[in-house]
Amino acid sequence: MSFETLLYAIADGVGTITLNRPDALNATNDTLYHELSGLIGDIAGDRSVGAVVLTGAGRGFCAGADVKSMNPDAKLLDRRARHRWILRDILQPLIALEKPVIAAVNGPAVGAGFNIALACDIVIASEKAVFSQIFTRLALVPDLGGLYLLTRVVGLNKAKELCFTAKKVTAEEGRELGFVNHVVPHDELMPRAQKLAAEIAAGPPTSLAMIKTLLNKSSTSSLEQMLEYESFAQTIAYTTPEHKEGVAAFREKRQPNFRGAE
């Protein structure tokens, strides 16, 4: 695949997406969003990919929207349509992608960049990473799901503080707040992220897809609803070739080959 604003490679069942506008700290523009939308769709249908790593080229993860490409004179309805397109075609498919996604945050993750990381399932941050809900500096409102995602990770009051103040948060502070899973030395970031992604990619794809989907529903569902979802999902899981392979591997005292199960 050839892109203008992305790099993409597959190895060991892991699809690695690199936001590739390093001169702009990988700030987003319409080209990047279009390419990312198409790539997420391709990954969703690619059975060779069991997990995804999302990172940035150069010294930044993503600096949010490219201010240079903003048009302050855009018509209100045009701006609304564009924003809804971004949410519908990029954010929601990324969250709903039935493959675990690891954000490998190598530097600043600011504004929309912060919220792209929050939309991933696991965040591994370099010690050089920094996060900010920078929107009030431009008299804007947190977008790309930030108002929803951040609150559910750090709690309402802390989310308000981060959004009101646009303060910078270090990787270690992010770990303490709960939106960063692991902080690692900068040179170890991609090896650690790739290793974890490969371990996950070797797992059973059907159960991983159902686990991700149901966990995403858990914060907005009642206990009764979750137990019903669980019952349906577990019933399906028992019928899969992956379950049969897992049982066979356990009995034969060997490692299961879930991705080769038919």
Image (cartoon, rainbow, N blue to C red):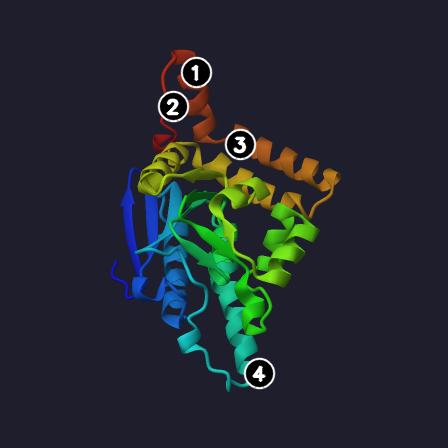
How far apart are the two marked residues, 1 and 3, measured between alpha carbons?
A: 17 Å
Q: What residue did someone put label 1 on?
A: 250
Residue lying farthest to the top in this orientation: 252
Please tell me which of labels 2 and 1 falls first in the chain. 1
Residues at discs 2 and 3 in contact (Cβ within 8 Å): no
Please tell me which of labels 4 and 2 falls first in the chain. 4
The local secondary structure at tag 2 comes to loop
Residue 12 occupies quadrant: top left
Task: Give x and y (percent) for residue 145.
Answer: 57, 59
Task: Give x and y (percent) for residue 61.
Answer: 39, 55
Please tell me which of labels 1 and 4 falls first in the chain. 4
The local secondary structure at tag 4 comes to helix
Q: What residue did someone put label 4 on?
A: 76
* Mark 3 crowdedness (10 Å alpha carbons): few <14, some 14-19, many ≥20: some
Please tell me which of labels 1 and 3 falls first in the chain. 3
Q: Nearer the viewer, residue 224 or 152?
A: 152
Task: Give x and y (percent) for residue 256.
Answer: 38, 23
The local secondary structure at tag 3 comes to helix
Q: Amino acid at mark 3?
A: Ala
Q: What residue did someone put label 3 on?
A: 237
Q: Amino acid at mark 2?
A: Pro
Position above or below: 73 against 144: below
Quadrant location, the C terminus: top left
Position above or below: 27 against 139: above
Task: Give x and y (percent) for residue 200.
Answer: 41, 34
Q: Nearer the viewer, mark 4 or mark 3?
A: 4
